[in-house]
Amino acid sequence: MKFLGTVAAALLLSSGAFAADAVFSGDSVPTAAPAAPAFDWTGAYFGVNAGYGGGKLKPHFYAYDNGSDAYLDASASASASGFVGGVQAGYNFQSGSIVYGVETDIQYSNVEAKLSGSVSSSIFGLDASASGSVKGSVEWFGTTRARVGFTPTDRFLVYGTGGVAYGKYKLKAEGSYDIGGSDDTGSVSTSKSKVGWTVGAGTEYAITDNLTFKAEYLYTNLGRWNLLELGDADAGLKLSSKLDFHTVRVGLNYKF
């Protein structure tokens, strides 16, 4: 009996030592997977975009006769719309949840509108009339803008943007006036590059660490263009138009 008790005690001690080795072995303890790093918006990017452009072509024309102080004033408007598409490039900096940077883009456009209008009256006993028509299109435009925004989540950016805009308009204008027997007609077809300003807002989402998708709205104003002047200092007609439009576009950026 004493021999059997000794053997049993030895077996218990050896099995306890084996269990301790199994518990404290480093190879058998599971480790937690490392957390995925937050997305960082800092860096350069390049991309493409496409969308819709539109607004109002708003010409203003007036006829005058300085000798009799007669004056006619009229304006008209017509909707303009068309496709816009192009490329953009920029650089972002991120500080906490704030993202800021600069972006420049260049766009092809076929936004186009045409309209005509006329006015007639009797002023100081003079029969007076004036008419005009304008056909205009935006051939291309571009912007260079600051962007400032914040990230509600690490991969989602909401931003405002604004800066300088530039573009080329092509316009054809025709006009005529008749005030108290003094009359003239004329037309001009011309294109001109203009510089103005733009402002807007957008959102951007990081699909992967290198590919982002954006949606953006911009209002662009390229000032006013004096299109046509007829007559002289005594009598004549002047025709001008405001050059502004809206764009809504989506795009993809590749972040380096």
Image (cartoon, grey):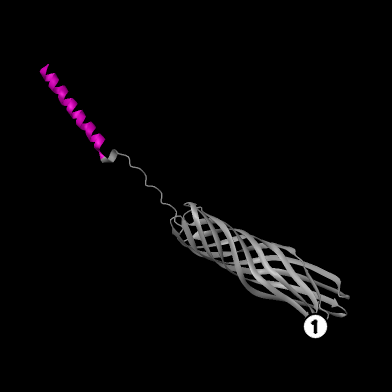
| Rendered position, 204 above or below 178 | above
Residue 219 falls within the magenta-colored stretch: no
Q: What is the secondary structure assignment of the residue under circle 1?
A: loop
Give me the residue at 25% from left, 38% from top: 25
Residue 88 occupies quadrant: bottom right
Q: Quadrant of the N terminus?
A: top left
Residue 47 occupies quadrant: bottom right
Instruction: Identify the residue position indicated by label 1 in the image.
Output: 234
Q: Nearer the viewer, residue 133 or 119?
A: 119
Q: Nearer the viewer, residue 245 or 135?
A: 245
Residue 15 image point, x, y percent: 21, 28
Q: Nearer the viewer, residue 153 or 6?
A: 153
Span colored in magenta: 1-25
Three-letter amino acid code of the residue under disc 1: Asp
| Rendered position, 20 above or below 134 | above
Q: In the visual, does 89 lie left or right of 67?
A: left
Give me the residue at 22% from left, 33% from top: 20
Residue 81 image point, x, y percent: 70, 62
Residue 7 falls within the magenta-colored stretch: yes
Residue 162 image point, x, y percent: 56, 64
Q: In the visual, does 229 lie left or right of 38?
A: right
Q: In the visual, does 177 lie left or right of 39?
A: right
Residue 111 occupies quadrant: bottom right
Residue 174 image point, x, y percent: 79, 74
**View extreme (top): residue:** 1
